[in-house]
Amino acid sequence: MFGSAFLEQLRVSPMNRWAGLVDSKHGKHLVRVSQITLKPSSAYESVRDAVYKDWVHKKREQWMDAQLERLRVERGIDLQEFIRHDAS
C-alpha cells in the first residue's frame, strides 16, 4: 500500500521511537514502530485446510482403534481366531 521503500525504512527504524520523515508513494510520514507481526507464509495458508482434515482423520482413527481395543479386552475377543477362520 505504501510501497517497498517505505517498508524497508520501517524495518531499520528503532522500536518504540518516533522516526521520520519516512517517504512513501503517498508523501512523507512521521512513524513509530511499536510492534512487528509476521504474516503466515502463503505456503501454509494454501495447505492449512488439508492439514486440518488430515489431523482430524488421524485423531478419529486413533479414537476408533482405542475403542475397538477397549471392547476387545472387555469382551475377551480373540482376533487371531477370526484371522484363522478367514484364512481357511
Image: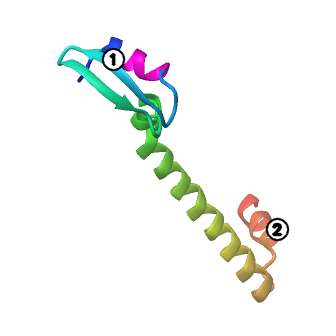
Q: Position of residue 78 (x, y in %)?
A: 81, 76
Question: What x and y, as percent, mark residue 32?
Answer: 40, 33
Where is residue 83? Give x, y as percent: 76, 64
What residue would you read off at disc 2?
A: 80
Magenta segment:
7-12
Residue at left 74%, top 80%?
70
Q: Neighbour class for label 2 at 10 Å: few (<14), some, many (≥20)?
A: few
User: What's the residue at 47%, 21% (across, down)?
Assistant: 11
Amino acid type of the residue that numbered disc 1 sits on in the rendered structure: Phe
Using the image, tell me which numbered label, if any, was put on residue 6: 1
| CA separation in Å, label 2 and label 1 | 70 Å
Left or right of 54 on screen, residue 61: right
Q: Nearer the viewer, residue 45 or 83?
A: 45
Q: Which of 43 and 8 is in front in this view?
A: 8
Front residue of 62 and 13: 13
Residue in the image at 80% along x and 64% along y: 84
